[in-house]
Image: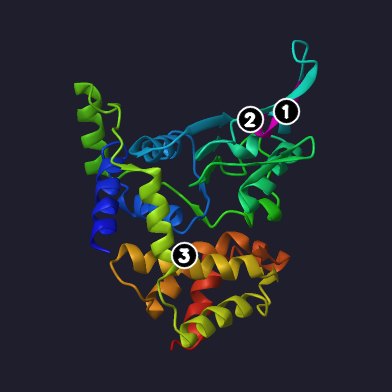
Amino acid sequence: MGKENTTIISLTENIRKRLIGKDDVIRKVIICLIAQGHVLLEDVPGVGKTSLAKALADSISVSFSRIQCTPDTTPADITGLSIYSSSNESFQIVPGPVNNNIVLADELNRTSPKTQSALLEVMEEHRITIDGKDIPVPEPFMVIGTQNPSQMAGTYPLPEASLDRFMMKLSVGYPDSSASEDMAKRFLEGSLHEKTESVCSGQDILEMQKECQKVTIHDNLRAYAVQIIEATRNKAEVSCGASPRALLSLLRCAQAIAYIDGRDYCIPEDIAEAAKLSIPHRLVLSTESKLSKVTKEDIVNKILTQVKVP
């Protein structure tokens, strides 16, 4: 795994040039990429959500598209449409921006639920359907969604079906003082927004994804993951627990964590970290929990202390 780890280090350092002081978030996005997942970035405007997505895309020599979601964005604006060609006297399919390797759906919760649902098929099956014709998207494929906090004006909360398609939901957060000073210095020098050169290819990512799938998860760790998922369904604070898709995401995420750490096997800490990354946003809290200000992260942490570690 030496070559792959070198590539991951180069990818991390390249993104770090554009997103200062956010090594933890960068690591998690790369884990998601290697695990063949999609990531949702939620935070206030201006903290670097879009910059992170663009830096990742620029660091890999693959196709990239950005969909700026607005209240009048339609499903066809995302998936594409069939138009009539008078010269050929036939309908021609024109794939939309989602037909790229890395797709940034910017401010996803500013568009209508109908338009949000246009991403459901392609995020799960890596294909789009236009006029009954299946069109596979290029591989590797990753959707990076960004959204503003739900209490902000003009937002439509993402439905549970959409949230369940994302492997992770992350927050970029404000930079600390030293990172802010570095950012200000580079901005005044004119070096903050320099273009990021690619350090790996799409084929490199595909090879790492295949290697990731070979990481061993022993039976006792697999049972540990199942127990964590089942515990979310038996909590009074949760009205809707983690889905079977959440279990699969947890396992693949754990493999990716082990892989980027240079191991071909998982340890219990990988399962626990993967649970913290892949479960909270999928839970639906009970009314009582919402009123008592219990967070989804608190519930997952509590479960991890209660489920016996192998």
Q: Secondary structure at mark 2?
A: loop
Residue 303 is labelled as: none
> Which residue lies at the image location 76% right of the left edge and 21% below the top edge?
83
Residue 81, percent from left and from top? 73, 28
Q: Residues within 10 Å of mark 3 (few under 14, many from 20)?
A: many
First in sequence: mark 1 vs mark 2: 1
Quarter-of-image position of residue 99: top right
Pointer 2 residue:
96
Callout 1, which amino acid?
A: Leu
Q: Is residue 74 visible?
A: no
Q: CA distance from mark 2 to mark 3?
A: 29 Å
Q: Are marks 2 and 3 in contact (CB under 8 Å)?
A: no
Pointer 3 residue:
253
Residue 81 is labelled as: 1
Q: Is residue 19 visible?
A: yes
* Observer-nearest of 144 and 298: 144
Which residue range is magenta in the image? Answer: 77-83
> Which residue lies at the image location 44% right of the left edge and 52% below the top edge?
33
276 shown above or below 266: above
55 shown above or below 226: above
First in sequence: mark 2 vs mark 3: 2
Residue 304, percent from left and from top? 49, 78
